[in-house]
């Protein structure tokens, strides 16, 4: 049919054969899956036999469900793709309640239900999930570098049952340090707080040191492995003259966000964090990817997988945009006059 020509309707008093309908639906779906588009679009849910239950999606997180900010945008996006929870899709959420060691048991529980797709709401859940199954599709929200981790030959070519949205770009600690110094030019000794067991952030320290050296700043490493390490690490930095702080993102530091903000307030230290939730909770500044976007894109991946697309046919996505946030109330409490230019370029601010 020529482009722009009206579609012709064939009237047939005999109902079309069921196999013809199924074949046409299959061809349309195959054409859609072959495009590889990385744009938001509404996906028509595949009709299922009434005797078969709706597809079941497992979702594993670290924080308590009530404190996890990405379930709501995920649910909304999933519905925009034609899947309504409790009607034509089932969503099972399991929280580790802040205990990393619980991930293997929760993943095992969700796989046994069984889950048709498993969504990994934390980067640290990827390894135990990949060990638990090589067949159930896994969708990540915040994986680091999937190529370095062995899950893809390239971002465009996942090689296993894992795909999704990454937080992989270049290490951003150096950029956060630059922004922090723009806000507080008087800083001289800056601590870098990171999870010592999170290998994906190993390059952050070297780039952070290089940036600090170029700006005549002294860099202080603060490495933690658990909640118990946090207060002693911050206190050790204070004893070394630390007057500012940069936080490296991972599941541990994200989970400890309220504690880090409280300690920074206690010691009157200006700090910059990796995500906007920190600013909303009283942190001075944040710079990082739009994680709400990751949650919405994860729903797109789930919809495609439910409809039969293979994980290896869905390329990993990198962050689409980065956000700068400033809490002007915290700045005032710290006696910091945020430069007008920085305030104007911020994507959001707490007044």
Image: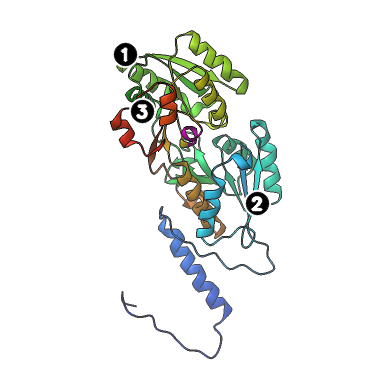
Crowd around label 2: few <14 · some 14–19 · many ≥20 (10 Å): many
What is the CA distance from the residue labelled 2 to the residue labelled 3?
Answer: 40 Å
Q: Which percent across, then down, holds residue 189?
A: 40, 13
Q: How many marks?
A: 3
On screen, 230 above or below 107? above
Magenta region, main secondary structure:
helix
Say which of 212 and 203 sits in front: 212
Using the rendered image of the protein, determine whether residue 297 is visible from the camera's viewpoint: yes
Of the numbered discs 2 and 3, the one sitting upstream in the chain is: 2
Write down the region rendered in magenta. 277-281
Q: Which residue is mark 2?
A: 115
Marks 2 and 1: which is nearer the front? 1
On screen, 177 above or below 237? below
Q: Which percent across, then down, holds residue 211?
A: 34, 20
Of the numbered discs 2 and 1, the one sitting upstream in the chain is: 2
Marks 2 and 3: which is nearer the front? 3
Dot 1 and dot 3 residues touching (CB under 8 Å): no
What is the CA distance from the residue labelled 2 to the residue labelled 1?
Answer: 53 Å
Q: Which residue is mark 1?
A: 216
Crowd around label 1: few <14 · some 14–19 · many ≥20 (10 Å): few
Of the numbered discs 1 and 3, the one sitting upstream in the chain is: 3
Q: Which residue is mark 3?
A: 175
On screen, 248 above or below 49? above
Identify the residue at image location x=67%, y=69%: 50
Say which of 210 and 158 sits in front: 210
Q: Seen in the image, is 314 located left or right of residue 209?
A: right
Using the rendered image of the protein, determine whether residue 158 is visible from the camera's viewpoint: no
Q: For residue 164: magenta?
A: no
> Which quadrant does the N terminus fall into?
bottom left
């Amino acid at each position: 049919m020529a482009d722009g020509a009206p579609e012709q309707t064939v009237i047939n008093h005999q109902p079309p054969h069921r196999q013809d309908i199924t074949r046409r639906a299959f061809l349309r779906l195959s054409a859609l899956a072959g495009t590889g588009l990385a744009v938001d679009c509404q996906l028509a849910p595949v009709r299922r036999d009434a005797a078969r239950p709706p597809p079941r999606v497992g979702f594993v997180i670290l924080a308590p469900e009530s404190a996890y900010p990405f379930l709501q945008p995920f649910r909304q996006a999933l519905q925009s793709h034609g899947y309504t929870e409790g009607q034509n899709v089932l969503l099972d959420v399991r929280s580790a309640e802040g205990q990393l060691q619980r991930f293997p048991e929760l993943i095992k529980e969700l796989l046994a239900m069984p889950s048709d797709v498993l969504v990994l709401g934390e980067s640290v859940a990827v390894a135990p999930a990949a060990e638990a199954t090589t067949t159930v599709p896994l969708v990540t929200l915040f994986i680091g570098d999937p190529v370095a981790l062995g899950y893809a030959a390239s971002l465009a070519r996942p090689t296993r049952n894992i795909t999704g949205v990454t937080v992989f770009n270049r290490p951003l600690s150096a950029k956060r340090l630059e922004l922090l110094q723009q806000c507080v030019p008087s800083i001289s000794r800056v601590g870098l707080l990171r999870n010592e067991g999170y290998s994906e952030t190993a390059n952050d320290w070297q780039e952070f040191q290089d940036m600090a050296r170029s700006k005549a700043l002294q860099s202080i490493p603060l490495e933690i492995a658990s909640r118990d390490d946090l207060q002693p690490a911050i206190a050790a930095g204070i004893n070394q003259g630390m007057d500012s702080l940069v936080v490296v993102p991972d599941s541990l530091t994200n989970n400890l966000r309220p504690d880090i903000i409280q300690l920074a307030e206690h010691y009157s230290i200006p700090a910059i964090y990796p995500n906007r939730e920190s600013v909303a909770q009283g942190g001075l500044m944040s710079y990082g990817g739009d994680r709400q976007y990751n949650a919405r894109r994860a729903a797109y991946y789930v919809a495609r997988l439910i409809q039969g697309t293979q994980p290896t046919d869905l390329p990993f996505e990198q962050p689409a945009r980065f956000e700068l946030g400033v809490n002007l109330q915290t700045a005032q409490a710290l006696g910091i006059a945020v430069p007008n230019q920085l305030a104007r370029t911020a994507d959001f601010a707490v007044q």
